C-alpha cells in the first residue's frame, strides 16, 4: 500500500508567478544636492536614487527590486536583481544614507498624518465618537500639557542633631574613651552650631 | 629570614589581618575629627565609629592609643579610595591598603598603630591558644 503511494507520480506544482504589482518607473522626487546630508552625498548617483526610490516605494512584495530597477540597476535575471538589491541594502554606506533620510521622511509623513486627522475631525460622514477622538488628538498636539516639577530637599529633624547639652556631654564622653581631647571636640561642636536650648512648654507660654 | 621580634613586620603579624582596615579607619576618623567644619551629627557619627572598633583582640585601650592620620597618610588613603569610585569603593580601597607592604608603610607613617598592636599582643596570643 505504501509502495503504491510512493510510486505514484506527484504532479509538479505549477510555478508561482507573482504579479509585478508596481511599475519600475521612478517615483521619488530627487532633491537638490545642497539639501542632501553627508551620508547621501557620499553615494554615487545610482545609489542615491536607490535610497530615494526605496523610501518612496510602496512597502510591499518586491519593492527592493522595484527600487533597484527604478534607480537604473540592470541584471541578467530577477534573481540576480534580488541579490543586487540585498547587497545594496546591506552595504554600510547605503544604511548610513537610509538612517540619514529616515527622520526627514518621518517628519514629512507626520505632517501628512495631521492633515488626515483634520480631515477625519471635520468630516460629517464619520461617526461622532471617531471625530471626537480626532479632535482630542488635534487639541493635545496644539496645546500640549506642560508640567513643572519642583523638588525640595529638606533635612528632617532626625537628620539634624542639635548641639544640646546632652549631645555635647555624649561627645565629651566618647572623645575621652577614644583618646581624643574631649574639650577640643566639644568646642568644635559648639562652634559649628550654636548650643541649642531645650524649649519647655512653660517657656513657650 | 625571620623578622626581628620588635620590628614593625613582627608587630603587624601579631594581629589578624582583618583588623588592619579597622586600624586605618580609626586613624582616618580621628584625622577628620580634628577638623572644625564637621557638623554635630558627623562628629558624633565618627566618634561612635571609633568607639565601635574596640572589639575582639582590638581593645579600647589600643583604639585610644591610635593617633590621627598625618596628611601623607590621608593622601594615600584618598588615592586608594579613588581607584574604584563605584559600589565597591571601600572593598577595593581596603583591599589595597591592607596589603602587607602598604600597611607596613602606613604603620611607619603612623607609629601609634604599631604601639596599639603591641597593646593587643596579649589578647592575640590568648585568642590563638
Image (tube, coloured by chain):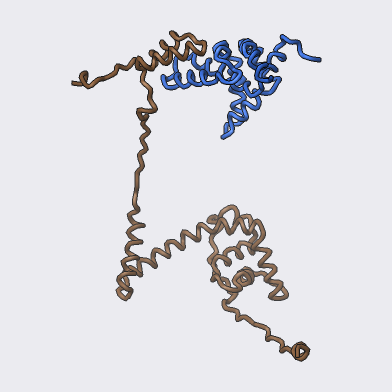
Of residues B64 and B42, the one nearer the viewer is B64
> In the image, what residue occupies the spot 64% across and 82% down?
A17
A123 lies above or below A197: below
Residue A89's spot in the image, x, y percent? 64, 63
Q: Which chain is blue?
A: B
Of residues B17 and B44, the one nearer the viewer is B17
**Chain A's shade in the image?**
brown
Q: Is residue A85 left or right of residue A167?
A: right
Of residues A166 and A155, the one nearer the viewer is A166
Residue extending farthest to the left is A205
A47 lies above or below A63: above
Quarter occupied by residue A98:
bottom right
Q: Does residue A194 appear in the picture of this structure?
A: no
Residue B90's spot in the image, x, y percent? 58, 28
Residue B22's spot in the image, x, y percent? 59, 21
> In the image, what residue occupies the spot 59% across and 63% down?
A51
A70 lies above or below B99: below
Amino acid at each position: 500500500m505504501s509502495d503504491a503511494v510512493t510510486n505514484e507520480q506527484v504532479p509538479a506544482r505549477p510555478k508561482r508567478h507573482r504579479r509585478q504589482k508596481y511599475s519600475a518607473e521612478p517615483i521619488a522626487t530627487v532633491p537638490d544636492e545642497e539639501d542632501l546630508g553627508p551620508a547621501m552625498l557620499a553615494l554615487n548617483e545610482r545609489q542615491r536614487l536607490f535610497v530615494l526610490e526605496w523610501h518612496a516605494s510602496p512597502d510591499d512584495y518586491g519593492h527592493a527590486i522595484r527600487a533597484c530597477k527604478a534607480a537604473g540597476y540592470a541584471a541578467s535575471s530577477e534573481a540576480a536583481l534580488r541579490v543586487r538589491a540585498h547587497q545594496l541594502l546591506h552595504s554600510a554606506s547605503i544604511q548610513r544614507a537610509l538612517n540619514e533620510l529616515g527622520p526627514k521622511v518621518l517628519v514629512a509623513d507626520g505632517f501628512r498624518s495631521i492633515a488626515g486627522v483634520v480631515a477625519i475631525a471635520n468630516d460629517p460622514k464619520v461617526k461622532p465618537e471617531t471625530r471626537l477622538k480626532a479632535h482630542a488628538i488635534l487639541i493635545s498636539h496644539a496645546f500640549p500639557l506642560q508640567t513643572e516639577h519642583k523638588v525640595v530637599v529638606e533635612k528632617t529633624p532626625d537628620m539634624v542633631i542639635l548641639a544640646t547639652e546632652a549631645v555635647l556631654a555624649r561627645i565629651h564622653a566618647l572623645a575621652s574613651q577614644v583618646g581624643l581631647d574631649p574639650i577640643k571636640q566639644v568646642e568644635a561642636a559648639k562652634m559649628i552650631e550654636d548650643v541649642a536650648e531645650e524649649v519647655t512648654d512653660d517657656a513657650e507660654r | 629570614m625571620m623578622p626581628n621580634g620588635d620590628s614593625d613586620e613582627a608587630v603587624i603579624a601579631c594581629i589578624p589581618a582583618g583588623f588592619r582596615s579597622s586600624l586605618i579607619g580609626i586613624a582616618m576618623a580621628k584625622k577628620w575629627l580634628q577638623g572644625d567644619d564637621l557638623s554635630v551629627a558627623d562628629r558624633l557619627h565618627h566618634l561612635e565609629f571609633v568607639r565601635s572598633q574596640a572589639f575582639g583582640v582590638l581593645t579600647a585601650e589600643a583604639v585610644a592609643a591610635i593617633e590621627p592620620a598625618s596628611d601623607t597618610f590621608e593622601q594615600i588613603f584618598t588615592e586608594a579610595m579613588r581607584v574604584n569610585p563605584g559600589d565597591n569603593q571601600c572593598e577595593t580601597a581596603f583591599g589595597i591598603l591592607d596589603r602587607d607592604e602598604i600597611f607596613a608603610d602606613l604603620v611607619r607613617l603612623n607609629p601609634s598603630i604599631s604601639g596599639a598592636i603591641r597593646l593587643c599582643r596579649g589578647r592575640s596570643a590568648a585568642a590563638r591558644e
